[in-house]
Image (cartoon, helix red, strand yellow):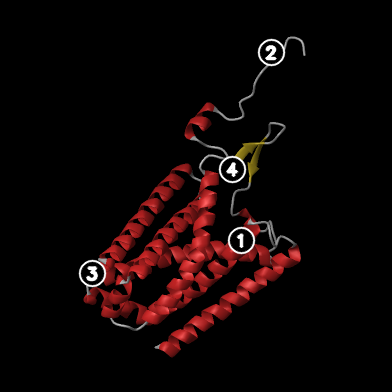
Amino acid sequence: MSGSKLHVGVMRSQLGRVRGLGSAKKGSGEWWTQRLNSIALVPLTLWFVISILRLAGLPHAAMVHWAGQPVNSVLLLCLVLATFQHMALGLQVVIEDYIHDEKVKLASLLAMKGVTALLALASAMAVLKLAF
Amino acid sequence: MMVARSSDGKLVRRPVSPFMLGSAYKPQITSVLSITHRITGCALAVGTLLMTWWLVAAATSPAAYAHVAWFIASPIGILCLFGWTAAMFYHLLNGIRHLAWDFGYGFELPTVHASGRGVVIGTVVLTVVVWLLGVILL
């Protein structure tokens, strides 16, 4: 070993570090968030299906009355928030897995997050408007 | 194909997802149910358009709500809604299967196969029950 300098290897490039690439950055937090909203979505989705069954075929006034009940407003808001967060994280993984061109990947992610945010806000706004 | 270096420094082409849908693996209940989870997830993402339309229309006016109601009752609307019901129950049941794995349960191969069959049967049963209830209530 004479002559060789002691070298501490950095496994990741400086650019990679700056960009925040690699394991255990945002990924583990996103994984955990996806599990949490999955659990929340199990009862919320079942409640939503039962609610839709009860509202099927009823006129606008019945839907407005139902959505105006505080319990239903809160559960609808929970459903909307959990659904769109779950959807954004899920579609993100699909895009990251199947789109290999970096530019197309970034554009797809931005478009997906934008559309998801718009749908989430529109839904939440509608629920609030029905509540007040 | 992703270009990378092997451990002896040679340039190699590594396969990238979804290469396994080709000839690399024989389709099995595990892999088919796995890709179905993704496909139903994407289908449900499209379905949120209808949920958003439904909520926004209800908050807008009776006339706007009548438009959604017309779409839902149309043949295409019923077909979409039926598909989304099945996709939703599949994704829900298989999602519970995934959560069990996350907690460390059900990894033995016979259990994996049995839970997979259970998800498929459960999806069919719940979808049929909900639509029967819908027909009866209407």
Instruction: Give me the disc on residue A46.
Output: none
Place residue B75 in its image quadrant.
bottom left
**Mark 4 residue type:** Met
Q: Give the residue pinned by disc 1.
A: B98
Q: Is residue A63 above or below residue A42?
A: below
Image marks 3 and 4: residues in contact by CB distance under 8 Å:
no
At label 1, which amino acid type do we have? His
Residue A99 pos. (x, y %): 50, 50
User: Tag 4's secondary structure?
Assistant: strand
Count neighbours of disc 1 (C-alpha within 10 A) and say few if under 14, some if 14 to 19, many if 20 or more. Answer: some
Mark 3 element type: helix
Q: Please provide percent x and percent y for residue A94.
A: 51, 54
Label 4 resides on the chain identified as B
- Where on the picture, by quarter, is residue A62? bottom left
Foreground mark, 4 or 2, reads: 2
Mark nearer the N terminus (3 vs 4) = 4
Which of the 4 quarters of the picture holds residue A3?
Answer: top right
Q: Residue at x 69, y 15 (%)?
A: A6
Dot 1 falls on which chain?
B
- Measured as percent of width and height from the top left, residue A27 is found at 53, 45
Local secondary structure at mark 2: loop
Q: Nearer the viewer, residue A115 or A125?
A: A125
Circle 2 crowding by C-alpha within 10 Å: few under 14, some 14–19, many from 20: few
* Residue B123 in view: yes
**Residue occupying the point 40% across, 66% down:** A75
Q: Determine which residue is flagged by label 2.
A: A5
Q: Which residue is mark 4?
A: B2
Q: What residue do we see at 61% from left, 61% from top?
A: B98
